Amino acid sequence: MNGETTEGMATTDTMGEETTDGPATTTEGMETTDDAGETTAEPTTEPTESEPQESVTVTVGADGAARYSPDSFTLAQGGEVTWEYAMGGHNVIPESMPDGASFEGSPNGESETQDSGFSFSETFDTAGEYAYYCSVHRSIGMEGSFTVE
Ligand SMILES: [Cu+2]
């Protein structure tokens, strides 16, 4: 006699996992008409500005706002900067650089913006002051700068 007792399998599926999506707050910093120089909640991971960094990653569109983070830092000569886009619709346009430098910025200059997830890197061998901006959001202060030393 084949007495298989199939007891009602107690399948304890723990499917009740909650996906922890962060709050989808897209705060576009478009509606600031006053140029109050207040910055909102800086990430604590920013390098100190005094010590030259060997490599720096700048987040483009940090915190859903039209800004670069960090927007100012000091890079060691020969160091590398990577711009990572957390948000699309921005670009990186060189404004000024030392003599002999060839800071190129994002592809195709002001005629193009890049999507979220895009990134590019440049190394900087020429010491001095560099400044850049986003051609779309320059008027609302989307600018960055750094010193190579
Ligand atoms: Cu922008």
Image (spheres, helix red, strand yellow):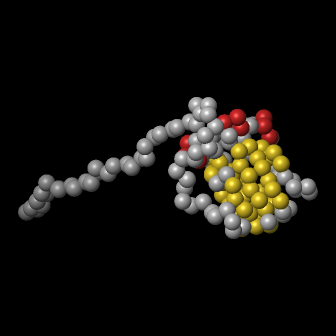
Q: Is residue 134 visible?
A: yes
Q: Quadrant of the C terminus?
A: bottom right
Q: Is residue 4 left or right of residue 89?
A: left
Q: Quadrant of the N terminus?
A: bottom left
Q: Is residue 9 left or right of residue 108?
A: left
How far across and down, in percent of the image, does residue 58 sit?
66, 54
Viewer-closest of 43 and 34: 34
The residue lying at 43 percent from left, 47 percent from top is 22
Task: Say above or below: 61 vs 122.
Answer: above
How far across and down, in percent of the image, does residue 70 sit?
64, 54
Viewer-closest of 108 and 144: 144
How far across and down, in percent of the image, does residue 73 sit?
69, 59
The residue lying at 46 percent from left, 40 percent from top is 24
Q: Quadrant of residue 30?
A: top right
Task: Say above or below: 13 vs 139.
Answer: below
Q: Quadrant of residue 101?
A: bottom right
Task: Say above or below: 5 vs 25.
Answer: below
The residue lying at 84 percent from left, 52 percent from top is 97
